[in-house]
Image (cartoon, rainbow, N blue to C red):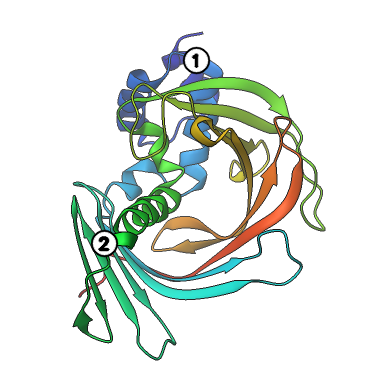
Amino acid sequence: MSLFCALAACGAPSDSEPVLDRLRAVTGDAAAAQAVTAMFSAYGGYDVWTTKSTAEYRYVFSLYGGESTPKQVTRQLHRLALRDGVQVTLEDLEAPAPRRVVVDGESLAVTVGGQPVDEPEQADFRRVYAHAVRWDFLTPWTLLEPGSRLTSRGVRTPPSSGPVPSGPCDVVRLRFETAGEGGGTDDWYDLYISRLSHLVEQIHSYRAAQDLYRLEVWGDHKDFGGIRVATRRTTYASNAGGAPLRLEATAEISDVRFDASP
């Protein structure tokens, strides 16, 4: 079945033409095209997403590292440019001497309590963290980035992560032609897209450089300016089969504002 037929079969929304143009570049798999097109519609529509240029939101990150209580809790305000390169600002909240980190392309600027500081030993970590924050917020729209490759992995039913049983999900694998912000060429992300809601239930991923599997469970989807965002994301250490093994961290997103005035 061609992509044209696949989109017609799943009742493609009115913004299907720009989606189809991008899909042609990243997949020839009809099942993957159907699942991703329905998913974008459920998240607000690709046409709506492309009208957004910046995002600002509150972010609470709780690091568990396998413990029953958080080892560390970080509260920040994040500001991201959604297009035109990597521009990320991370500001501490509720801290006596708040740190502000600005990554703009290759440049990095850090202030603590309003004063510039030089932390060369932390520079690489801060850049990687800023890229990871941006990638996580932009997912699932990152599936159409240049260099992405999408294939269907069939239909699976993941274990329930809450009181509501999980239903069958279309699984779409994201890989990369070249190493970039999302990972290396041997890395992959399996997105479990609910056949009922067409929202992402979870993401099972593999990072080849660390030989590391992770499972990120999404929940509490909310609408902000016409775009739905998973406001709670729980990360577990995992295995090749996708089973959650150890609680690593939770991330909570709130008060999302798109294209907010500075």
- Name the amino acid, label 1: Asp
State the SS at label 2. Answer: helix
Measuring 66% from the left and 71% from the top, which residue is drawn there? 70
What separation in Å lies between label 1 and label 2 (alpha carbons)?
A: 45 Å
Measuring 37% from the left and 42% from the top, which residue is drawn there? 46
Q: Residues within 10 Å of mark 2 (few under 14, many from 20)?
A: few
Measuring 52% from the left and 30% from the top, which residue is drawn there? 208
Judged left or right of residue 28, residue 97 is left
**Tag 2 residue:** 120
* Mark closest to the chain's N terminus, 1 or 2: 1
Closer to the camera in the image, 83 or 111? 111
Quarter holding the C terminus? bottom left
Q: Are marks 1 and 2 in contact (CB under 8 Å)?
A: no
What is the tally of numbered marks visible in this picture? 2
Residue 226 is situated, as x and y percent measured from the top left of the image, at 41, 58
Measuring 35% from the left and 83% from the top, which residue is drawn there? 98
- Name the amino acid, label 2: Pro
Place residue 252 in its image quadrant: bottom right
Residue 10 is situated, as x and y percent measured from the top left of the image, at 54, 26
Q: Residues within 10 Å of mark 1 (few under 14, many from 20)?
A: some
> Which mark lies nearer to you, 1 or 2?
2
Residue 228 is situated, as x and y percent measured from the top left of the image, at 48, 56
Judge whether 97 appears above or below 198 on screen.
below
Closer to the camera in the image, 111 or 142? 111
Judged left or right of residue 225, residue 188 is right
**Tag 1 residue:** 29
